[in-house]
Image (cartoon, rainbow, N blue to C red):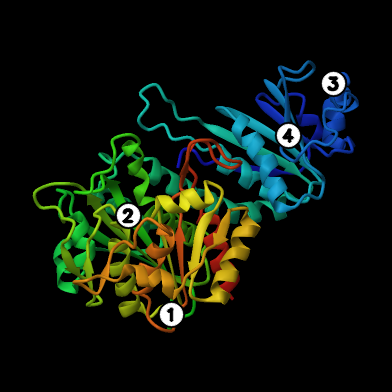
Amino acid sequence: MPNLIAPTFAAVDLDAIAAFEGRVALLIGADGKLDAGARRVNRLTKGAIARVVEAGKLEDAKAGKIITLNYPAGMAATALDIICLERRPDALDARKAGAALGKALDKGAALLLAGSNAKPAQIVLGAAMRAYEFTPHKSDAEVKARSLTVMCAKPEEAEPEARAFLAVAEGAHMTRDLTNEPANVLTTTEFAIRLKEMESLGLVVEVLEEAELERLGMRTLLSVGQGSDSPSKVVVMHWNGGEKGVKPLALIGKGVVFDTGGISLKPAAGMEDMTMDMGGAGVVSGVMRTLALRGAKANVVGLVGLVENMPSSNATRPGDVIKSMKGDTVEVINTDAEGRLVLCDVMWYAQERFAPVGMIDLATLTGAIVVGLGHENAGVFSNDDALCSAFLNAAKAEGEGAWRMPLGQAYDDLLKSRIADMKNIGGRAAGSVTAAQFLQRFVKDGTPWIHLDIAGVASVKSETTLAPVGATGWGVMSLSRLVQDLYEH
């Protein structure tokens, strides 16, 4: 992945600072105290660092504030970055500082003087996450060959810790790449090919084609893609890093590579953003890559339903009744409520085949969740307090916004159909909740389950701390953490 920074860690070498050609960054806390590296830079620049401190530029500064001096006198560096960060920061503040550096990085070499800072690996994670760019379709774009040398007190400890964090960053980058990709490039077939390539990492990857899906009875999933020339597929990714015979955690992703709304056609304005409607499948793919790269000691299976929702003479119509793999019938009221039709069959298949210890589905499912929670939090729905609490704790620790939403019989009653077992929508009110209630009908008794509606967080119009505009990779860090917390022993 050309975006991913490959850092090297080294002991602090004060004599190498002056001659370093590239970008040099140093860390200073709000108290303005300079460590050995900062003192050496201050001497080389004839007191420039001290003048910044004395001017009060770092007083009350939040972690990640950056002051850049271009072509500092007395050094070969092209730029000198002064980044605000305490010597013993928490993990999220360390990532913010790293993100400030990652945003500033251009092609070429960079040197971070981390000194005795307690979180050098977290700083590197922040830098790696924020330095991401998506440029494969820009004719004038060049691959930026970037290197980052981190001078720190204990490089032998920081390097293996950073390696595990960079596995998370690489998974998030994959999610971003998939989510940013235009639909004429990331077809259902191309998506499956990219996932199949992860067998080189130790994953076992199966691709179920339409004939097999028909045999299995995945009619609701197939009904979504039947208006498109792109074949519908289900990809199953196995990571068997835990004890043999232990049931896996199942991750399920909605992979609608483009969503026109079908016969219930969306408005033209903003429809170009529907390339990101496979965001849930993108997150599952990124998590599976991360687990393989870091050698997670857990059994996890990732399943993604890949379809394209198009209007045509073969498309599903409003009013059609479809039988799911479970056997329940669904009256399709709105063909733009298609994600739940994809997920319900894949969820049932996952339970029938794997009897998982828990199941988490992710989907850019409803605009209603964006109305309710904006772009700060994903909606979290669950039938199991313990699993839900564990996920919310993981998301909080990783700085990824998540908020638990309600479920209840009154919402479920809104799905009653006159002619079938259920409707695929429950009306305008509580749209994200009724969507979750629909999915819960396909969760077997005794299966701990979480539904994550990521419509507001998968792709955003303004940059976040760790990501530029566009796909965020939200969820890769939290789910990797959850697997580590609950299932790795």
Query: Residue 289, how many percent across, how many down?
Result: 44, 57
Q: CA distance from mark 1 to mark 4?
A: 45 Å
- Tag 4 secondary structure: loop
Q: Nearer the viewer, mark 1 or mark 4?
A: 1
| Amino acid on which disc 2 is placed | Gly
To which residue does mark 4 refer? Answer: 65
| Amino acid on which disc 3 is placed | Ala
Query: Is 26 left or right of 199, judged from the image as shown?
Result: right
- Report the front residue among 159 and 414: 414
| Amino acid on which disc 1 is placed | Thr
Is residue 324 something one can see in this rendering? no
Is residue 118 something one can see in this rendering? yes
Residue 447's tag is: 1
Q: Nearer the viewer, mark 3 or mark 1?
A: 1
- Tag 2 secondary structure: strand
| Amino acid on which disc 4 is placed | Lys
Query: Is 106 left or right of 411, judged from the image as shown?
Result: right
Query: Is 341 left or right of 39, judged from the image as shown?
Result: left
Query: Residue 89, how many percent across, how many down?
Result: 78, 49
Residue 473 higher or lower than 127, as above or below:
below
To which residue does mark 3 refer? Answer: 48
Residue at the image point whose x is 51% and y is 31% from the top:
145
To which residue does mark 2 refer? Answer: 255
Going from N to C along the chain, the mark reached first, 2 or 3, is: 3
Alpha-carbon neighbours of circle 3 within 10 Å: few (<14), some, or many (≥20)?
some
Which image quarter is the N terminus in? top left
Going from N to C along the chain, the mark reached first, 4 or 3, is: 3
Q: CA distance from mark 1 to mark 2?
A: 23 Å
